[in-house]
Image: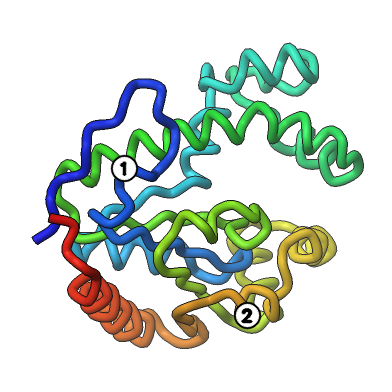
Amino acid sequence: MATAPPTPTAEQSDLSPLKGHTPLIGLTGGIGSGKTAVSDLLAELGAGIVDTDLIAHQITAPHGAAIALIEKQFGPDFIAADGALNRDKMRSLVFNKPEARKSLEAITHPLTRQETVRQALALSKEGVPYLVFVVPLLIESGSWIELIDLLVLVDCPEETQVQRVMQRSNLPREEVERILAAQASREERLKHADIVIENQGSLKDLEVEVQDLHQKILQFQKDQPSSS
């Protein structure tokens, strides 16, 4: 059994204390692929889940950690009446102005990373068998691949993604296709994946695939040299 990870300093903002102690699994996939369904099933099996998209929403929720900085950078028009980020207005801006996207990411990415590491360290101390980082733009980030031990891709045909997002988010096809175009291609994600979860069938089919994934990760953990 691996030894407990060392306690990090307050300033530490990376995952290095966990390397060699807790398997770090990156879970990604295009919009509408089913990442949340997979992570929910893995959580039921005991995995520690850190959802970076959920964290990003939390820091831009009413009075979230990023709100004051966003208002200072972009102005009060980008803050909704409830004190949250005006997502529709910001989405329109960053799609049309790459420099605005970079300014927003300069605010949100460090805050998201801090909370990601905080949650990961806390879950590791609870003794979870492995950690799953749900990262929608894992491939695009360029940095996550070096941090994780295994990259799991949730995959489905692009048209399935489009239909799911249109139904789920009530968005027009054109907007969904624009979001897809801004993400890594299906081929690019498949090229980087260590394990692929096919999510084209029923929930029962997905449950079987996730059970198999869970066993593969546990076997990966057993196969690693002991850190003791």
> Residue extending furthest left?
1
Q: Quadrant of residue 98?
A: top right
The x, y position of residue 36, in whole percent, is 44, 61
- Badge 1 or badge 2: first in the primary sequence: 1
Placement of 193 over or under 8, stated as above or below: below
Please name the amino acid that badge 1 sits on.
Answer: Pro
Please name the amino acid that badge 2 sits on.
Answer: Lys
Q: Which residue is mark 2?
A: 191
Point 36% across, 58% down: residue: 24
Camera-nearest residue between 82 and 145:
145
The x, y position of residue 23, in whole percent, is 30, 61
Q: Are marks 1 and 2 in contact (CB under 8 Å)?
A: no
Is 129 left or right of 109, judged from the image as shown? left
Placement of 66 over or under 22, stated as above or below: above
How many angstroms separate mark 1 from mark 2 (CA)? Answer: 28 Å
Quadrant for the C terminus in the image: bottom left
Point 78% across, 59% down: residue: 182
Quadrant for the N terminus in the image: bottom left
Q: Residues within 10 Å of mark 2 (few under 14, many from 20)?
A: few
Point 52% across, 64% down: residue: 28
Is 139 left or right of 202, judged from the image as shown? right
Q: Element under label 2?
A: helix
Camera-nearest residue between 187 and 31:
187
Q: Residues within 10 Å of mark 1 (few under 14, many from 20)?
A: some
Q: Which residue is mark 1?
A: 17
Point 21% across, 73% down: residue: 218
